[in-house]
Amino acid sequence: AVITGAGRGLGRAYALLLDEKGAKVLVNDLGARIKGDGADVSVAQKVVDEIRTAGGEALANGDSVATLEGGQAIVQAALDAWGKVDILIHNAGNFRYGTIRDISYEDFKAVVDVHLMGAFHMVKAVHPLMCDAGYGRIVLTSSIGGIYGNNRCVNYGASKSGMIGLSNVA
């Protein structure tokens, strides 16, 4: 299983649950702060250490989902370790608040790059593998904000709505 944003919160819970079910888990997390700045791969490593202590098999990864190359590198790390990817959970995220009126282009793009484009980069990397194998599961973590929107998070709402569409297509 490849899980992005797996160092904390919901992503961590996904990683621990899949380990408990016997999956080998690639824990991807930059360890960035909520705005997406900074990086600390030890966040992912702590989850890996927890999985290994419990007797599971896991690998930490700090590549960014925000680029096509990063998505490919994340999946390649799992392929190099285990030869296949059966499960993708894209849970990576960041927040930069702003309304349509006052959000900067950079803040809008920073969130879209991680949530929506990150989802695309990850799906683009695993979809052919899963189709060729005749099996696979893709989970893109969206939000009620993608259905109803949020005045103060235009970038987040647009990204999460797009993820719902991408999930339906994948």
Image: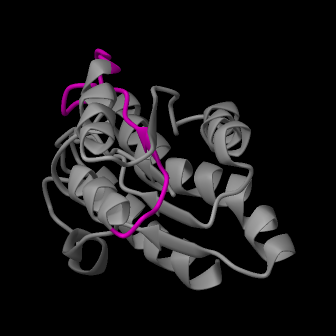
Query: Residue at image x 14%, y 61%?
Result: 151
The spot of residue 39 in percent (x, y) is 32, 17
User: Eyeballing the image, is 122 above or below 163?
Assistant: above
Which residue: 36% across, 64% down?
Answer: 18
- 72 or 168: nearer the eye? 72
Q: Which of the pair 122/74 is nearer the observer?
A: 74
Quadrant in which the C terminus is drawn: bottom right
**Measuring 69% from the left and 59% from the top, which residue is drawn there?**
126
* Residue 29 on the magenta segment: yes
135, above or below 28, in the image: below
Check if residue 123 falls in the magenta segment: no
Colour mapping used in the image:
one colour
Quarter residue 38 falls in: top left
- Span colored in magenta: 21-41
Q: Quadrant of residue 124?
A: bottom right
84 w.r.t. 36: above or below: below
Residue at far front of view: 55
Q: Nearer the viewer, residue 149 or 60?
A: 60
On the rendered structure, is 81 left or right of 15?
Answer: right
Quadrant position of residue 78: top right
